[in-house]
Image: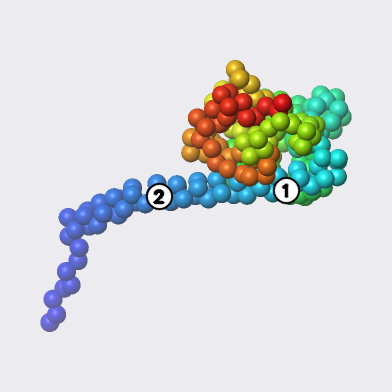
Amino acid sequence: MEGRKKGFTLIELLVVIAIIAILAAILFPVFASARARARTVACLNNLKQLGTAFQMYMQDHRGILPSTGGNDVTGWCGDYRGPRASAKGFGGRWIVPEDGDLWPYCRSAAIFLCPMDKRVKPSSGEIDMWRHDPRDYPLSYSMNSALATRKPDSLNVNPGKCMLLIHERRAGEDGGQYINDGIFNPSTDPVDLPSKVHYGGTCVLYLAGNANYRDYEQLVREMTVELAWFPQ
């Protein structure tokens, strides 16, 4: 008569569980880091596509960049505010990329939103809380206000270091605004600081069309010391 097969002892089972827990503790941060890096790559691809749209817009508008929006115009990203927002039925402020100046040249709302921001709720700000879920706010990027409606060919700047678009955090952290409104206001004594949404830095599209990751210290230096973001 065959004997009964020996099963795992309690100690052996606990050892296996401990090994699995150790492997999970090692691998999960690696997987999370890989996902975050993939989102950074996707963000850079978005910026490159938007950079192409900017170039096409300028070709059709005598080499002039679009505006950052206002009460009477929607600007590059379809920014509704003031009377135009009320007329559109928005209770506060909203971004509608399909109504922006770049839309005819890209026709993809997805490239206005970094994967890092999907389903991330902005903090308080002028957005329409009644008609939309604020987590669906469709904009991650802001345009350098110093370049709005300017002609790059006439500016004394290094286009490879002059920021055109920057990925800003949605909730007013890092000294930034409460909500990304599509406008970045550079200053030597800044109230609107670069964000740290990607690994202690963020993604930037420069006037020359190159999209790069920059850490926070690099960005602040470019803006406040090198004055690279200010057209002369």
Q: Quadrant of residue 140?
A: top right
At a point 14% along the width and 80% down the height, the residue shown is 2
State the image coordinates of residue 141 (x, y, percent, origin top left): 66, 37
Answer yes or no: is residue 113 visible.
no
At a point 67% along the width and 44% down the height, the residue shown is 209
Q: Amino acid at mark 1?
A: Thr
Residue 158 in the image: above or below residue 24:
above
Q: How many numbered circles does the render carry?
A: 2
Q: Label 1: which residue?
A: 52
Q: Amino acid at mark 2?
A: Val
The C terminus sits in image quarter: top right
The N terminus sits in image quarter: bottom left
Q: Label 2: which residue?
A: 30
Q: What numbered label is drawn on residue 226? A: none
Outermost residue toward the top in this view = 189
At a point 40% along the width and 46% down the height, the residue shown is 29
Left or right: 180 in relation to 83? left
Report the colour scheme: rainbow
Q: Residues within 10 Å of mark 2 (few under 14, many from 20)?
A: few
Q: Residues within 10 Å of mark 1 (few under 14, many from 20)?
A: some
Answer yes or no: is residue 147 visible.
yes
Outermost residue toward the bottom in this view = 1
Q: Quadrant of residue 149?
A: top right
SS at circle 2: helix
SS at circle 1: helix
